Amino acid sequence: MAPAALDRPPTAYDLVEYPARPRATTHPDHLATIARLFGLETAEASHARVLEVGCSDGGNLVSMALSLPESRFLGVDAALSAIEEGTRVVRELGLSNLELRCADLLDADATGFGTFDYVIAHGVYSWVPEAVREKLLAVCKASLAPLGVAFISYNTYPGCYPRRMIREMMLFHVRGVSDPEERIRAALEFLAHVSQLQPEGSPSRAALDHELKQLAGAGTSFVYHDAIAPENVPFYFEEFAADAARHGLAFLSEAQFFESFEAARRSGLARSIPEGAYADIVRAEQYLDFLKARSFRQTLLVHDGVTVDRRLDPRRVQRLFACGRLVRTQPEAAGDEGAEVEFQGPKGRRARTSDPVAKRAFDVLNDAWPAALAFPELLRRTVDRSDLSRSADEIATALGSALIDGYASNVLELRASPWPFTTSPGERPLVSPLVRLQARSDGLLTNLRHETVSFDVPLGRKLLGLMDGTRTRGDLIEVLERDSAANRSAGAPPPGELALAQLERMIAELAKLAVFVA
């Protein structure tokens, strides 16, 4: 369906585009995983209904729709130009399960989108006027299925106080400047100028330099739509929770489980929170924000009255899949199975355990990476290496608890379903249609882990576009031979051998990016 033109002035997002990127914490499988840890029987991601409010050009939804063809997706946004661009991509990919619709939440019928298992609103709540925030919560309440989960991200205090100070400085400087590019340039230049005037090593210089680095990495569109946006209101978590409660919505968890109070209890961080707050999850989470100086939240909500079991029963993990790249940071002494061992995961995250079952399971996951193993398969591989000093039930419980601990430490991932990619493409490699489309340009790629990845090898990007499941490796080698013929040096291996070795290296490198369809 073509987006209808709206009889209203262009939005800020029409003036300066802000393309949506895939966000793993919004994926329905991720939301289902968190919900099931708390005892909720949410819809399977493979047959879910998903609404995204503030979808921009659909960059978050397109990847989901491709890998979940039996699910249905609706994205709404007030920026007509973004909806038009996203609709073009949807048509080019032939997606019949995704609709992008131009709509303003303040329209009278904006709560009539239908019923959805998952509602996503990333980058909306803090960046719109109060009336729109209220309507957003009303839409979540009206659209959410009885056991549905809503995702809402927003800026928070106390961590946003330094950023608020810097934002107000930039806004003061660009008052009266209307041209978007000039506003961005002037704001950044002024911030850099003020930073240079601060004493080297001073707290003010450190804060300004940190913000400049963050803004430079985020890009000019982020500066325009976040740092100097007309609306950018942080909230204390307790305030947000109260607003949600007025609309009949209750707190479930943070979308990043390792940021939740339950994770803090398992890590020991919660010991710094007054015990009297433990019985009130909102109060406990607010204390956690103080301890972390949190500046941003990705909060999951459910209907008020839905039973949330925060005991985190290890048996619930038995229906999930696990994956992780967990490297031992030191060898284990021979024969000392009870010794504590430290494992390091991605981004330097670490977890320590002395449980033999946990250590064996973490080794198994590391050997299987990047595959996700179903709990029964992981248990089988773990038990095979065990001396069976504990009963099967005890081992299963210990394994479930270890996986929750690893998830709470952010060293491993839990999923409700297996990954849709393979690291062993066959004779006719099939790359995700979205990656093939993106490979035509020189931009970022969206892989089948619902992540943004970079791959800047020109020949590799050409191969990505060709690997549509119809070409054999021999067909691809012919392409490589044609491309490399002009650069072949004397004494080089025969063309066929050279191209085959080059192709296998390229496929192995691409497989690590999770772009091949299983």
Image: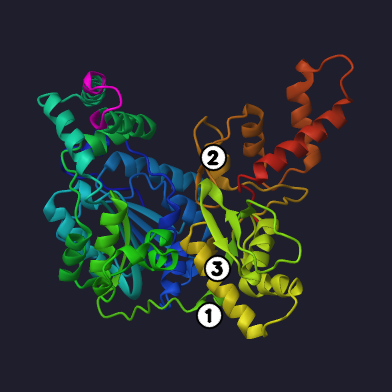
Q: Which residue is mark 3?
A: 403
Mark 3 nearby-residue class (10 Å; few <14, some 14–19, many ≥20): many
Of labels 1 and 2, the one closer to you:
1
Looking at the picture, which amino acid does disc 3 mark? Leu
Q: Which residue is mark 1?
A: 315
Looking at the picture, which amino acid does disc 2 mark? Leu
- In-front residue for pair 216/383: 383
Q: Which residue is mark 2?
A: 437
| Mark toward the start of the polypeptide (3 vs 1) | 1
| Mark toward the start of the polypeptide (1 vs 2) | 1
Membership of 153 in magenta stretch: no
Q: Is residue 329 left or right of residue 43?
A: right
What is the x, y in percent for residue 374?
A: 62, 70
Looking at the picture, which amino acid does disc 1 mark? Arg
Name the residue rendered at 52%, 38% in the picture. Answer: 438
Under circle 2, the secondary element is helix
Distance between the alpha carbons at the discs numbered 2 and 3:
37 Å
- In-front residue for pair 55/226: 226
Viewer can see residue 106: no
Q: Quadrant of the C terminus?
A: bottom right
What is the x, y in percent for residue 169?
A: 15, 30
Q: Is residue 80 left or right of residue 481?
A: left
